[in-house]
Amino acid sequence: MTIEVAAFRYVPPFAQGYVRDLRVRWALEEAGIPYEAKLLEMGEVKAPDYRRWQPFGQIPAYRDGDVEMFESGAIVLHLAEQSEALAPRDAAGRARVTTWVLAALNSIEPHSVAMIHPDDDDSQEPWAVARRGRLEAELTQRLDALAGWLGHKDYLEGRFSAGDLMMGSVLRELVDCGMLARFPTLDAYRARCEARPAFIRAMEAQMKPFRENAPA
Ligand SMILES: N[C@@H](CCC(=O)N[C@@H](CS)C(=O)NCC(=O)O)C(=O)O
């Protein structure tokens, strides 16, 4: 059976290039595994039929001949089991990849999402200013530690893996707020990830339907 990845038919410009089906498309491109995108409207994603595939009514979802899945991290790990391009074949190497995928999603992304979308966006109330300062300090600590680990390596474990795919995906969301520029090592790492031909193909595959379905 052809692999199917659920993606949005169209999203507003601010979200284009950031919808999380990109992570799955990127993993498939790195692995050289063909797939088809099942393009959906927001209304379809919230309908009961789709929620049987993705209970939270979100993108992405994934199915192949054997499995139906949701959660971009779980899907990327599933693909990493199948491809040496995404993870080494030995158990110790695979365990490191799992570790970095979860580190990206669990130890970096919650801090980055809190920083990018604070509930108190523009508020100058003292508590809101203090909260934003706290979020920034927490994220800074994590990014400092990550930059320390990466050091002069090209990728987190030397060679590219699904761990870098996920970490690069999380870090690129910190470009627009200016946070990543404070960490030149991490910004260069992000750029290295984004320069990969598989990433470029995945990005084009996400963007093409957005161009084709843009409101007149
Ligand atoms: N933890 C989920 C998050 C998925 C997610 O946040 N998807 C967004 C697009 S990037 C979405 O569908 N948003 C629409 C909504 O939540 O209503 C994953 O990584 O797959």
Image (cartoon, grey):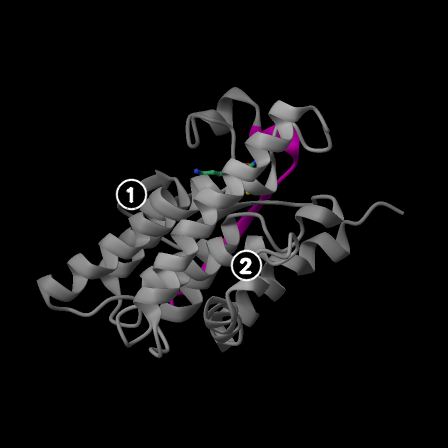
Determine if the magenta segment contains residue 109.
no
Q: Decide: few, some or many residues near mark 1? Use Cα within 10 Å; few <14, some 14-19, many ≥20.
A: few
Q: In screen coordinates, is 115 left or right of 140?
A: right
- Please give the range of residues in magenta: 32-45
Give the structural element (helix, strand or loop) at label 1.
Answer: loop
Q: Identify the residue at the far right of this view.
A: 216
- Which residue is under mark 1? 67
Mark 2 / mark 1, whichever is N-terminal: 1
- Disc 2, SS: helix
As drawn, 109 above or below 80: above
Query: Image check: 204 left or right of 163?
Result: right
Q: Nearer the viewer, residue 91 or 205?
A: 91
Counting from the top left corner in percent of width and height, residue 137 is at: 48, 44
The residue drawn where x is 68% and y is 33% is 121
Does 200 sit left or right of 71 as displayed?
Answer: right
Mark 1 residue CB less than 8 A from any atom of ligand 1: no
Residue 133 position within the rendered picture, expressed as x and y whole percent measured from the top left? 56, 39
Q: Is residue 35 magenta?
A: yes
- The reply to whether residue 63 is in sight is no
Q: Residues within 10 Å of mark 2 (few under 14, many from 20)?
A: some
Q: Which residue is mark 2?
A: 172
Q: Real-space Cα distance between discs 2 and 1?
A: 29 Å
Give residue 28's quadrant in the image: bottom left
Amino acid at pointer 1:
Val
Q: Amino acid at mark 2?
A: Arg
User: Residue placed at 71% from the left, 53% from the top?
Assistant: 210
> Considering depth in this image, is 121 or 84 the residue closer to the camera?
121
Q: Is residue 183 left or right of 71 when viewed as pictured?
A: right
Which callout, 2 or 1, points to the residue nearer the camera? 2
